[in-house]
Amino acid sequence: MLSPLAGQVERYMDLLTARQKLVASNIANADTPGYHTQDIDFQTEFQNAAGGPPRTIEVQGLQVKNDGNDVSLDRESRLLSENAMRFQLASNLLRSEMRILRSAIQEGGKTS
Amino acid sequence: MPAPILPVSPAALPDAIRLPGESAGSGAFQDVLAGAIHSVEAFGQDASASVQRFLAGEGEELHSTIMATQRAELSFELFQQVRNKVVSAYQEIMRMQM
Amino acid sequence: MSLFSVLSIGASGMAAQRIRAEILTQNLANAETTRTPDGGPYRRQDVIFESTPAESPFSSVFNAQMEAAGGVAVSQVVTDSGAPEMRYLPGHPDANSEGYVAFPKINPAEDMVDLMGAARNYQANVAAIGAVKDMIERSMDLFR
């Protein structure tokens, strides 16, 4: 039911969701002393056919403030928007595929 | 005198609609129906399991659960159409045999 | 974690930043307060943030183990215990025997900048909640 591509798109949405959760945590902890920005290695996780929950990693190369916190609100805000837009795109792709399939099923029923 | 019209059970349906000349092993209609039923059951079970996990708060994502239920719906709709086709094909053939 | 529990992460961020803003505003309002009910000048206060595990009434215990840091909370409000700033004002009603008045040790400019930071972070948390809510709604759109 539905193409194998639909499974890929769902996996994409899983990873976007995981990433967005971490972005929200980063934003909430933007002032927490010692807190390190968290993320997932999106491309690697997407290539990984095995699936399952993605691994949380600490982002390297960020500027660290005096209290040990390295959250960049600019980075997190950008990711927040990007993840949201990609998720919207993915859900539209799935809806489109389902519409086509449903239409094909119903059309098939009409000819007799 | 034509053969008496016997009530047809669902199990006998595939045999009854097999065209004369077709080998006994083909069962094309039977395979199609069986395949569709199996598909519906499988997707239905996947959907139930997904909903269970979601309700229990076991980390199932909302879109995964929705997609599982949509797959179950779509496979059922497909099955309904297939069944309708099979039944009308059978009726067509029965008319011919008269 | 489900997307729904992320809403409470954003909410915790909003709550923490609001408390921070309140404390900073209190500092600014009392920058010149030389007399408090406890005696002595106003003492500057600060908030300490701490990560909290993400929780939702809907998650199972099994799920809680897979989570990294989630939300945030104010773990304590600390009061400055250092020496106050002394200014020579012999005519002041709160002057001591040598003519010095104890003032709060507050740098209003600093607290003002922090306050703007708190407001900005509060907004960022609001945006995060909005984005997550949107994703939940988009998922629901997958229903026909």
Image: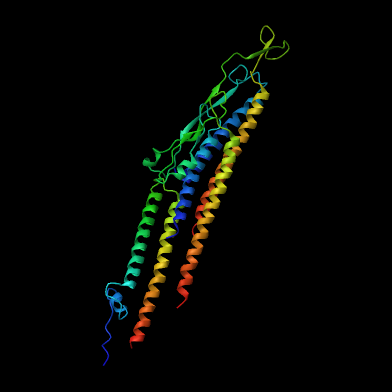
State the image coordinates of residue A110 (x, y, percent, origin top left). Answer: 47, 75
Identify which residue, C74 or A40, lies in the foreground: A40
Q: Position of residue B69 (x, y in %)?
A: 42, 58
Judge by depth and name the residue closer to the eye, C26 or C144: C144
Could you say which quadrant of the image residue B37 lies in? bottom left
User: What is the number of callouts on the image?
Assistant: 0
**In the image, is residue A28 above or below residue B73?**
above
Q: Quadrant of the C terminus of chain B?
A: bottom left
User: Picture coordinates of residue B8 (x, y %)?
Assistant: 28, 79
Residue depicted at 38% across the width and 49% down the height: B53
Q: Is residue B74 left or right of residue C131?
A: left
Q: Is residue C38 above or below residue C8?
A: above
Q: How far across and down, in percent of the image, does residue B57 sit? A: 40, 46
Identify the residue at the far top of this view.
C98
Image quadrant where one finds the N terminus of chain B: bottom left
Residue at the extreme bottom of the image, as rendered = B1
